[in-house]
Each structure stands twice: as C-alpha cells, then as structure tokens.
Image (cartoon, rainbow, N blue to C red):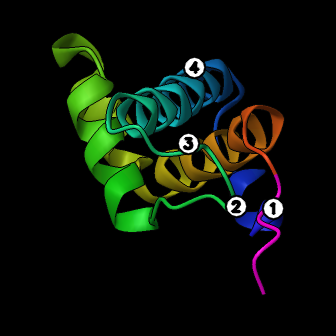
Amino acid sequence: MSAVVSTLPEDWAPVASALGQAWAQDCATSLVAAEREVVGAWPGTLREARQRVIAGVELALRADAMRHLDDLARATYLAARRHWATISEPDLEP
C-alpha cells in the first residue's frame, strides 16, 4: 500500500495526515463517550477513509483532490492507523 501512497502529491500528504489523525481521535472519543475502551486494532476502513477525504477537503480544492481520491484515502487510512496505535491499548483478549 505504501507504494501507492507515494504517488500522492507532496502537498497533499499533510492533508491526509491531519484527516487521519482527526478520524482516529474522533473514533477514540466516540468509544470513550460510549464507556468503551480504546483497545485493539484500528477499526476504520478504506471506504470510510474515502468519505473522510471527500468531507474534509475544501470545496476550492475538490477537483484536484478528486483526481487523487484513492491515494488520499489510503494515506488518510494509514495516518489514522498510525495515530490509533499511539492512543489505543493492546487487545489482550484471544
């Protein structure tokens, strides 16, 4: 997956990273609000990442972003997984 993400234009990498971090934090906040623990592997999907990208990209930049939607979604997904790993506890259940 990283080979595809490397085709993402350099100026979009920070956008994907910020979207991914915000997504992971939103998920963690929702779990805590539901009195659940932030545990285990990243629960997000690439389909959700695409929706985050579509919702999070400024309207003025939308045309350029749509050309790179799949790459942005993958980069967003990977950023969310990385951030999730920093805020979640390991799942000790078998």
- Total numbered labels: 4
Residue 62 in magenta? no
* Separation of marks 4 and 2 at Cα, in angstroms: 22 Å
Residue 40, disc: 2
User: Callout 4 environment at 10 Å: few (<14), some (14 to 19), or many (20+)?
Assistant: some
Front residue of 92/15: it is 92
* Residue positioned 57% across, 51% down in the render: 77
* Separation of marks 3 and 2 at Cα, in angstroms: 19 Å
Q: Nearer the viewer, mark 3 or mark 2?
A: 2
**Amino acid type indicated by mark 3:** Thr
SS for callout 4: helix
* Separation of marks 1 and 4 at Cα, in angstroms: 17 Å
Magenta stretch: dominant secondary structure: loop
Give how far across and how far down residue 62 sits, in percent: 24, 28
* Residue positioned 76% across, 65% down in the render: 91
37 to 86, vertically: above or below: below
47 to 25, vertically: above or below: below
Q: Nearer the viewer, mark 1 or mark 4?
A: 4
* Residue positioned 74% across, 70% down in the render: 1
> Magenta segment, which residues?
90-94
Marks 1,4: beta carbons within 8 A: no
Q: Residue furthest left?
A: 59
* Separation of marks 1 and 2 at Cα, in angstroms: 22 Å
Give how far across and how far down residue 48 sits, in percent: 33, 56
Which residue was labeled with disc 1?
Answer: 2
Residue 18, disc: 4
Marks 3,4: beta carbons within 8 A: no
Marks 1,2: beta carbons within 8 A: no
